[in-house]
Image (cartoon, grey):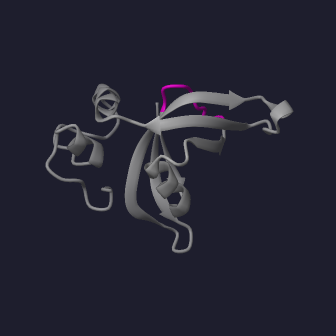
Amino acid sequence: MLHRLKCWPPYFGDMVDGKKTGELRREREDRVFAVGDLLWMDEWDPEIETSTGRAYVFTVTHLLRNAAHFGLRDGFVLMSVRPTTKYEWADTHYAAASDGHSEDCCCIFCVAAGKADRPAAGRGS
């Protein structure tokens, strides 16, 4: 499953650079995470309340939940993540017919997979 999430600039940069390999999020009834899920992280500037236009996709490799003995409150999940390869993205991206992307899509991941020439305005990195 693909989850589109906002990420503030300092944390986004650390994730892209590989310094931050974990993500703490609150789970909701409509947003439950699983190993193998993809996290589409949109860099979000809270001062101007808009996307910076940079995005990156990470794969969930491990989950920690229901761990009050470690100080993790109920309803939260700590995810280990790693950058998603263009091949993993392509397998997920093109398998989902209802994800809003067509053969001529120009999002950054279609470009990386060789399916388009350039990223769409405001969605590239």
Reply above or below: 93 against 22.
Answer: above
- How many numbered circles are shown? 0
User: Compared with residue 121, is residue 60 higher up or lower down, i.e. above or below?
Assistant: above
- Please tell me which residue lies in front, 21 or 108: 21
Q: Quadrant of residue 93?
A: top left
Who's the residue at 46% across and 58% down the image?
Answer: 43
Q: Residue furthest right?
A: 69
**Viewed as shown, does residue 115 lie left or right of 38?**
left
The residue that appears at 56% across and 74% down in the rendered structure is 47
x and y, in percent, of residue 26 in the image: 68, 43
Please check the rendered image and state whether residue 116 is part of the magenta-colored stretch, yes or no.
Answer: no
Say whether residue 36 is magenta.
Answer: yes
Q: Quadrant of residue 72?
A: top right
Vertical order, 79 against 36 (above or below): below
* x and y, in percent, of residue 114 in the image: 16, 39
Which residue: 45% across, 51% down?
Answer: 17
Residue drawn at x 82%, y 39% as measured from the top left: 71
**Magenta stretch: helix, strand or loop mostly:** loop
Measuring from the top left, give residue 21's x and y in whole percent. Answer: 55, 42
Q: Residue furthest bottom?
A: 48
Q: In the rendering, at what x and y percent does residue 10 appear?
A: 54, 62
Instruction: Decide if residue 91 is on the left or right side of residue 118.
Output: right
Which residue is nearer to you in this view: 68 or 2?
68
Name of the residue lying farthest toward the left: 117
Residue 23 in view in this figure: yes
Q: Is residue 30 visible?
A: no
Quarter the C terminus occupies: bottom left
Query: Magenta segment range?
Result: 29-37
